[in-house]
Image (cartoon, rainbow, N blue to C red):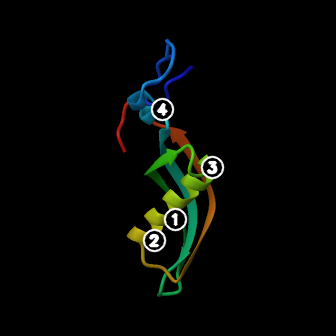
Amino acid sequence: MLDPHSGNMYQGGKLTESERMIMSYTNIEVSVDVEMMFASGEVHSVRLSGIPCKWVWGETSREAAEYWAALEHISDNYKFEWMSIKSWVGSPVKDKEI
């Protein structure tokens, strides 16, 4: 079994509680293509990268976790009249706490 936190193979019998906690999420780095219209009326298409996402396995799908991480990042860091997420992609991150 692969440990998603360390990327190492897990060998042994039953998991301890702390091992179960480690294996219950995956850190992901999200990149998103977004179109935004600002108060000036200007519309810009941009690619934002390096957005941190922590996907907790039992809570939601990976796709939903990535989408919401991107949406929250955009909402927290940009002022816009409207925006549209055109596409996004996430890549698991090894040995990096998000």
Q: How far apart are marks 2 and 3 (CA)?
A: 21 Å
- Callout 1–callout 2 Cβ contact below 8 Å: yes
- In this rendering, the answer to whether 41 lies above or below 85 is below
- For this orientation, the residue located farthest to the top is 12
Sequence-first tag of 3 and 1: 3
- Kindly state the secondary structure of the residue where label 3 is placed: loop
- Kindly state the secondary structure of the residue where label 4 is placed: loop
Report crowding for label 4: few under 14, some 14 to 19, many 20 or more residues within 10 A (C-alpha).
Answer: some
Asked which quadrant contains residue 97, the reply is: top left
Sequence-first tag of 4 and 2: 4
Q: How far apart are marks 3 and 1 (CA)?
A: 15 Å
- Amino acid carrying mark 2 in the image: Ser
Q: Name the residue under label 2.
A: 75
- Callout 4–callout 1 Cβ contact below 8 Å: no
* Residue found at x 46% / y 19%: 8
Task: State the residue in front, 65 or 46.
Answer: 65
- Amino acid carrying mark 4 in the image: Met
Q: Distance between the residues labelled 1 and 2?
A: 6 Å
Q: Name the residue under label 3.
A: 61
Tag in front: 3 or 1: 3
- In this rendering, the answer to whether 6 lies above or below 10 is below
Q: Where is residue 3 drawn, in percent x and y? A: 49, 25
Tag in front: 4 or 2: 4
- Amino acid carrying mark 1 in the image: Leu
Q: Where is residue 19 drawn, in percent x and y? A: 42, 27
- Asked if residue 98 lies left or right of residue 93, the reply is left
Q: Mark 4 points at which residue?
A: 23
- Kindly state the secondary structure of the residue where label 1 is placed: helix
Q: Where is residue 37 drawn, in percent x and y? A: 54, 79
